[in-house]
Image (tube, helix red, strand yellow):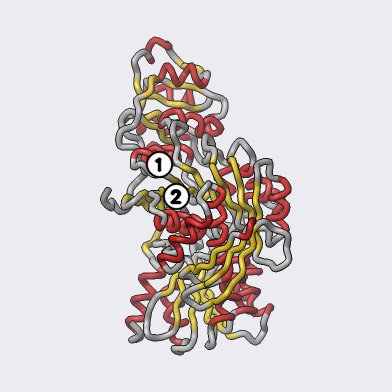
Amino acid sequence: MTSTGQLNTLRPSHPPARLVTDLVSRFDLAVTGELAELDGLLLTGITLSSKSVQPGDLYVGLAGVHAHGAQFAADAKAKGAVAIVTDARGAALAAPTGLPVLVTADPRASLGALSAWVYGTAVNPPTLFGVTGTNGKTSVSYILEAILRQLGVLAGLSTTAERRIGDLAMVSALTTPEATEVHGMLARMNEAEAEAVIIEVSAQALTRHRVDGIVFDVVGFTNLTHDHLDDYHTMQAYFEAKQPLFTPERAKRGVVITDAEWGKKLARAATIPVVTLSTYPGQAADWYAAILRETIDETRFILNGPDNQSVTTSIPVLGRHMAENAALAVVMLVESGIPLAEIKTVLDRDGGIQVYIPGRAERIENSGPAVLIDYGHSPDAFTSTLDSLRRVVDGRIIMLFGADGDRDPSKREEMGQIAARLADVVVITDFHPRTEDPAAIRAVLVGAARAAVPGREIYEVADPREAFRKALSLATADDVILYAGPGHEDYHEVGGEHLPYSARDDARLALHEFGWL
């Protein structure tokens, strides 16, 4: 396959054709109008976005916060939808289209099963890996794909950053896409003869039925830290959203990092076979990872397991947390049936794990200060990266960051406090203010930082381009600039509008302006 750049969705090129009458009988759907109208009617796809309807699609109209999807049934028909699935309220809205309307009480809860049936994804599936946790999901997913590639295995990838199979890729909109997209993507990857598929699984994916209809072969858990409390309100509720991934309905086997109490709790609560992994000496676990060497560009570690199994390798990214992510990936591969000795052979051959993780402690090469662009936007992510930098950097750490609007405001003060305590210079800017007042968001961050360390050198610069240049103006060649938040993203969301902005590209431009690139 060849690269296509950004696509709307990944779907099979040759989807199976399904009879709508078979759909009705299999899922016991009510039909408005005459059942005879459905005779011989075929469908070849499924979507819940009227914008992405393709000829032959089943359009699913869901009730939303601001509108009902069935309101867009006419648009779906114009693009070639052959039938509509919706609830009773949606049936009335969709009736004027004249399309067959199939009714179920809870279309969202049925979406995974419907999508799996339409695309036939339960037939001869590849080995399926699912990764969940607050931080590290994307990194573990990329590391899994990288090691599989080194093993000669073609693997599909679905992450916060992108969906990819071979050279075919698309930019992601959600950490985990909707069930219609997930199953379409799996069908496309099956067409491409992928032997494995790795999917990031967010808490929202589980509570909103996005991975319904999938049973993972191996699932992994990284950690649970302060984030998404705007959705789940308490850490216990957040935990309970992720816990179902470790049940027989969702997965066959699991690997859990037990460095923190939430991991221990999950390992105890899981109802599937689970092995545990720790980086803490003396902690009871099935596998243990220890850091051997850290630099700003690489982390070397040893992983020891049952029956005296061991591998020593490295990952070309900063941080013990990245070594932990890599160890989790290795253990997940072992749990999938790949011998550790086979993994060790290819890692020794290649000089370590050959992985590129976009926007995760990604270094922008230049002749001046070290510049790292990172996606971390939570208190724990800040702590992990700053602690790692402190162990390997001789100069000052200059941290540039903001907090996103319309997302869990309860973590903002802690983010400001951690930045002030662990960095030498803090530059606070705007980061996806969305519909909130950006000045108000910055005021919380600045106030928390100043209260935490009254003498800390702190700057407030609203525009992220100017803020990065301010950070550069303060740096010497021995310093490091950590720009936390934007990572791989290529936009800045303000007032509901996505404005073009890539921190990586802008950093290169600014470094060139300063004569360091």
| Residue 472 point in image, percent of width and height | 44, 83
Would residue 81 appear left or right of 429 to someone viewing this image?
left
Numbered mark located on residue 185 in the image = 1
| Residue 514 point in image, percent of width and height | 36, 85
Q: How many marks?
A: 2
Can I make out residue 487 in this image?
Answer: no
Residue at the (67%, 56%) spot, across then down: 286
Q: Which badge, 2 or 1, is on the more N-terminal residue?
A: 2
Would residue 456 appear left or right of 120 to someone viewing this image?
right
Q: Would you call the spot at circle 2 few (<14 residues within 10 Å), some (14-19), or many (20 or more)?
A: many
Tags 2 and 1 touching, CB below 8 Å: yes
Numbered mark located on residue 45 in the image = none
| Residue 349 point in image, percent of width and height | 41, 65
Whole-Å distance between the Cαs marked 2 and 1?
9 Å
> Which quadrant holds the C terminus?
bottom left
Residue type, label 1: Met
| Residue 415 point in image, percent of width and height | 62, 69
Would residue 424 appear left or right of 93 to someone viewing this image?
right
Residue type, label 2: Ser
Front-most of residues 77 and 474: 474
Residue at the (50%, 65%) spot, across then down: 375
Numbered mark located on residue 158 in the image = 2
Would residue 332 appear left or right of 511 to someone viewing this image?
right
Q: Is residue 423 above or below residue 374?
A: below
Q: Is residue 474 above or below residue 66?
A: below
Q: Is residue 18 above or below residue 270?
A: above
Q: Would you call the spot at circle 1 few (<14 residues within 10 Å), some (14-19), or many (20 or more)?
A: many
